[in-house]
Every structure is written in structure tokens, then in C-alpha cells.
Amino acid sequence: MRFDLARAVADRIGVPIHQGEEIVQLVLHSIAAALSRGERVELRGFGTFYVHTRNERNGRNPMTGESVRIPARKLAKFKASKEIAKKLLAAPTEP
């Protein structure tokens, strides 16, 4: 998928594919760096990447039934824009 995106970028702006790959890599690295700093990344018309913190909670080992403590952690999440959500709803479903 990353290669397809790089090829699309390269074709669109008229540069070699290796430069398209560098551009895609730079964008993805920039998003990851912002998320690691706890920042939101909003791409207008596409969606928003943000950091979600899951609180510590109790869980259960399914094999032993033993109660275990699951530590808090941070997750990267994505919320699609309204435009993307509408396109997904309008897209034909695969059998």
C-alpha cells in the first residue's frame, strides 16, 4: 500500500518513484513524531490522528482464570472526516 501511495504521489507531481517514496515516508514520519509528542494531526477533508490513553484496568487470563492488572497505555487512533465517511457509506460492499 505504501508503494502504491508513493507511486501515485510521484505520478501526480511528476517526479521519480524514489522521490515519491521519500515524500510519503516524510509525511508518515511527521505524523508519527507529532503523535509521540501527544499532538493531534488534522488532515482537512481526510481525518484526524490523535493519541488516546487507555486507563489501567483489571483483566482475566483466559487460560487460568487468574485476575491480572492491565497497565495504562497510549494508542494512536484515527477518526475519518465526514467526507471520507460518506464515501465509505456510498461504496459498494464486497460479498
Image (spheres, grey):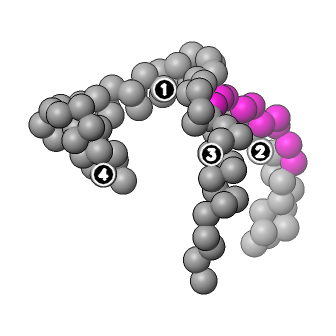
Q: Is residue 10 visible?
A: yes
Up-down relation of residue 68 to residue 32 (above or below): below
Quadrant of the rendered structure where residue 59 is?
Answer: bottom right
Find the distance from the CA under tag 1 to the CA under tag 4.
19 Å
Asked whether 64 or 70 is in front, the reply is 70
Numbered tag placed on residue 31 in the rendering: 1
**Pointers 4 and 2 in contact (CB under 8 A)?**
no
In the image, what residue occupies the spot 33% across and 45% down? 5
Residue 51: % across, % down:
66, 29
**Pointers 2 and 1 in contact (CB under 8 A)?**
no
Numbered tag placed on residue 84 in the rendering: 3
Q: Secondary structure at mark 4?
A: helix
**Pointers 2 and 3 in contact (CB under 8 A)?**
no
Q: Nearer the viewer, mark 2 or mark 1?
A: 1
Q: Secondary structure at mark 2?
A: strand
Q: Residues within 10 Å of mark 3 (few under 14, many from 20)?
A: some
Q: Residue under circle 4?
A: 4
In the image, what residue occupies the spot 24% across and 46% down? 7
Quadrant of the rendered structure where residue 95 is?
Answer: bottom right
Residue 52: % across, % down:
72, 32
Find the distance from the CA under tag 1 to the CA under tag 3.
19 Å
- Label 4 or label 2, whichever comes before in sequence order: 4
- Label 1 or label 3, whichever comes before in sequence order: 1
Q: Nearer the viewer, mark 4 or mark 2?
A: 4
Q: Residue under circle 2?
A: 70
Numbered tag placed on residue 93 in the rendering: none
- Label 1 or label 4, whichever comes before in sequence order: 4
In the image, what residue occupies the spot 12% across and 37% down? 16
Asked whether 16 or 21 is in front, the reply is 16
Provide the residue span drawn in magenta: 48-58
Asked whether 11 or 24 is in front, the reply is 11
Q: Secondary structure at mark 1?
A: helix
